[in-house]
Image (cartoon, grey):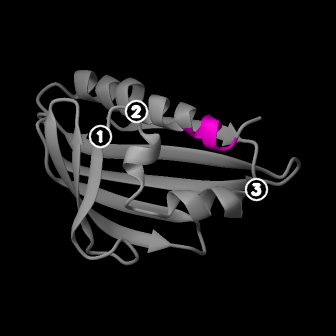
């Protein structure tokens, strides 16, 4: 059961992607994340590992893809206090051609004993608040 959220921001897709492609700035815009630092790599290429401090403890995530052409990135959770396995997420920015705004979507697939609960946790507790906070960086 995938977790999914999306929004439209009042900024060009290239500008939004320029901000979101930074794998090290999550603490700037995702509510609850108090620390985001690199353990391996510098965030500019796949293989980078970041450590996050947030609700419930420490998370470690590895950047899998970073594609400037499609304005998308994917990552996996290596370590987490949440009861999930095989977590893979993708976020993508696309232009809304009739308005010049940016469509942003964030999704994840994973395995969990209680997939319904974890889908709700990621969708409502991570993705939706994260995307909503981006409106502060790209106000209407």
Main secondary structure along the magenta-highlighted residues: helix
Q: Is residue 75 visible?
A: yes
Residue 76 image offset from top left, x and y in percent: 25, 57
Measure how far apart labels 3 and 2 are at the Cα level: 23 Å
**Few, some or many residues within 10 Å of mark 3 (<14, 14–19, 20+):** some
Relative to 18, residue 85 above or below: above
Residue 104 image offset from top left, x and y in percent: 60, 47
Q: Looking at the image, which is closer to me, 85 or 26?
A: 26
What stretch of residues is rendered in magenta? 134-138
Measure how far apart labels 1 and 2 are at the Cα level: 8 Å
Q: Looking at the image, which is closer to me, 118 or 1?
A: 118
Q: Nearer the viewer, mark 1 or mark 3?
A: 1
Q: Nearer the viewer, mark 3 or mark 2?
A: 2
Residue hosting label 2: 31
Residue 9 image offset from top left, x and y in percent: 69, 42
Query: Which residue is at 87% across, 47% downward?
Result: 99
**Element at label 2:** loop
Q: Quadrant of the N terminus?
A: top left
Q: For residue 51, what is the image quadrant?
A: bottom left
Measure how far apart labels 1 and 3 are at the Cα level: 28 Å
**Few, some or many residues within 10 Å of mark 1 (<14, 14–19, 20+):** few
Residue hosting label 3: 12
User: Disc number at residue 34?
Assistant: 1
Q: Looking at the image, which is closer to me, 9 or 96?
A: 9
Q: Looking at the image, which is closer to me, 100 or 88?
A: 100
């Amino acid at each position: 059961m995938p977790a999914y959220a999306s929004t439209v921001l009042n900024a060009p897709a290239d500008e939004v992607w320029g901000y979101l492609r930074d794998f090290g700035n999550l603490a700037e815009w995702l509510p609850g994340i108090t620390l985001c630092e690199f353990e391996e790599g510098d965030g500019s290429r796949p293989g980078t590992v970041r450590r996050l401090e947030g609700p419930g403890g420490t998370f470690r995530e590895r950047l899998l893809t970073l594609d400037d052409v499609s304005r998308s990135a994917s990552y996996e959770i290596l370590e987490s206090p949440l009861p999930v396995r095989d977590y893979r997420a993708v976020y993508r920015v696309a232009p809304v051609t009739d308005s010049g705004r940016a469509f942003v979507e964030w999704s994840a697939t994973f395995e969990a004993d209680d997939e319904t609960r974890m889908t709700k946790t990621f969708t409502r507790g991570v993705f939706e608040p994260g995307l909503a906070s981006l409106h502060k960086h790209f106000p209407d």
